[in-house]
Image (tube, grey):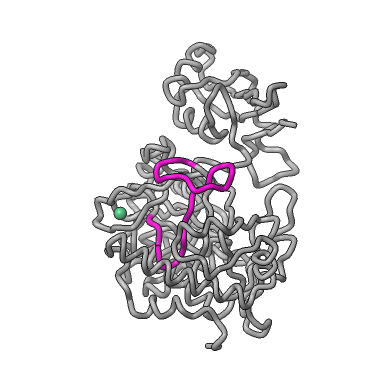
Amino acid sequence: MNKKSNQFIADYIFRNLDIQHYSKEQINQIQVELLQAHLKFIAENSLFYKTHFSKNHVDISKIKSIDDLKIIPPTSKEDLVHNNNDFLCVPEDEIIDICLTSATSGEKPAMLLQTHSDLIRLAYNEEVAFAMTGLCANDTLMVCAALDRAFMAGLAYFIGGTKLNARVVRSGSGSAVQHWQMLKVTNATALVGVPSLMRKIAEYGIECGENPSKTSVKKLIAIGEPTRDKSLQLLPLTKSLEEMWGAEIYSTYASTELATTYCECQKRQGGHVRPEMIITEILDDNDNPVRAGEQGEVVVTPLGVTGMPLLRFKTGDVAFIIDEPCACGRTTQRIAPILGRKKQMLKYKGTTLFPNGILAALEGVSFFEEGYVEVKSNPDGTDKVFLHLCLKDNTINQNMIEEHLRAKIRVVPEIIIESKDTIMNVIYQPEKKRKRITFIDSRN
Ligand SMILES: [Zn+2]
């Protein structure tokens, strides 16, 4: 491995440090050390951050604590997309893998170039995340996520699973039919994938006259979609998914830029932060850190990345930190389920809410068929929120829906009941093919 690389994390990893049970003071001390090494590495090697520091008069030698990070303005996704190559910290011949970030709202994807050491770090990250759920070398883990198209996730699950010594089945981005068949052949004990896909796989099994809860699957590791609400209760759809499979569902939070996974332990009460891998901050609208329990944007500094390391990267996701000790005995902080995307936050009747939160309040309710949220601007800058929906049961009236929503989310958007065809035409727009549209933002 090259000398130039940001190898300090390897020292911690290969010493097999049991940081998860250290005291808060010890964890803090290790994080500060790792942070200082990270800052030094990017100040020496990243053209983007050299410019960023000098433009904002940042003297990194003044950073003596995690709190001091606030003197550095955060990095946005736009920074990464528009100055992509300036983030590279190693000679090009040290790059062995090219990952692409997901493209959001018209932006093109950015590249995140990975070195050999980054892949070792990624494998370690996923190994410890899987181990957190109780997965071990006796498991057969079926990866139901894309391993191709330069995605990081599928690659991470594969190398992490093999590092755990589990048998990994690269089921990939196949159809529910293929996944079901693969499962029957391999006797997989755990699946990793998007919950909506796991549902389709189970439904296909039921169509074939079989019972998914009688298969070998004992764990479902959920990616990409929330499984719990703000108070850490299982969403109705998650609960029914667990029942279908007769398996426990574990939630994870990760993205390409994070290169790190927040994974639930067996107590399943929020994703544990891996302090040796990432610094997690929650910032308010003015980029000031908020206290544990208060919601804001998740801003991360993944530690030990060598190819294209990031500093205070704004994820665009909204969540809060749980700082109370976990029943599992780990001392590390946890991150609550992602409440939504910051861009989609609605300012409504003196409160903030998210389109997916409104729809989640209706999930699994017997009269609800499908729906989407639309938002427009009021002249005073607040939002006008509409809930378009179709019903399974036409004896239900508007008042009953309002009452249900008031009980669940305290506020009630304007409800518009429409025909199933009208709603489906909006949600499944043919040109968008794979993606369901459940939020239309018409704010100016
Ligand atoms: Zn725990």
Look at the image and tell me in which quarter the C terminus lies: top right
Residue 339 vertical placement versus 415 (above, below): below
Percent x, y for residue 263?
40, 56
Residue 374 vertical placement versus 113 (above, below): above
Query: Which one is in front, 34 or 72?
Result: 72
Percent x, y for residue 103?
68, 55
Residue 371 visible in the current orientation: yes
Percent x, y for residue 268?
33, 49
Q: Quadrant of residue 243?
A: top left
Numbered range of the magenta stretch = 272-295
At x 40%, y 62%, the residue is 274
- Ligand 1's image quarter is bottom left
At x 41%, y 35%, the residue is 236
Query: Which one is in front, 85 or 355?
Result: 85
Residue 418 vertical placement versus 10 (above, below): above
Residue 280: in magenta span = yes
Percent x, y for residue 246?
33, 47
At x 59%, y 36%, the residue is 345
Q: In this view, does 56 lie to the left or right of 230?
A: right
Query: Which one is in front, 31 or 211?
Result: 31
Residue 421 visible in the current orientation: no
Q: Is residue 83 left or right of residue 192?
A: right
Count of numbered circles on the image: 0
Q: In which quarter of the image is residue 113?
A: bottom right
Query: Which one is in front, 194 or 314?
Result: 314
At x 28%, y 65%, the residue is 22
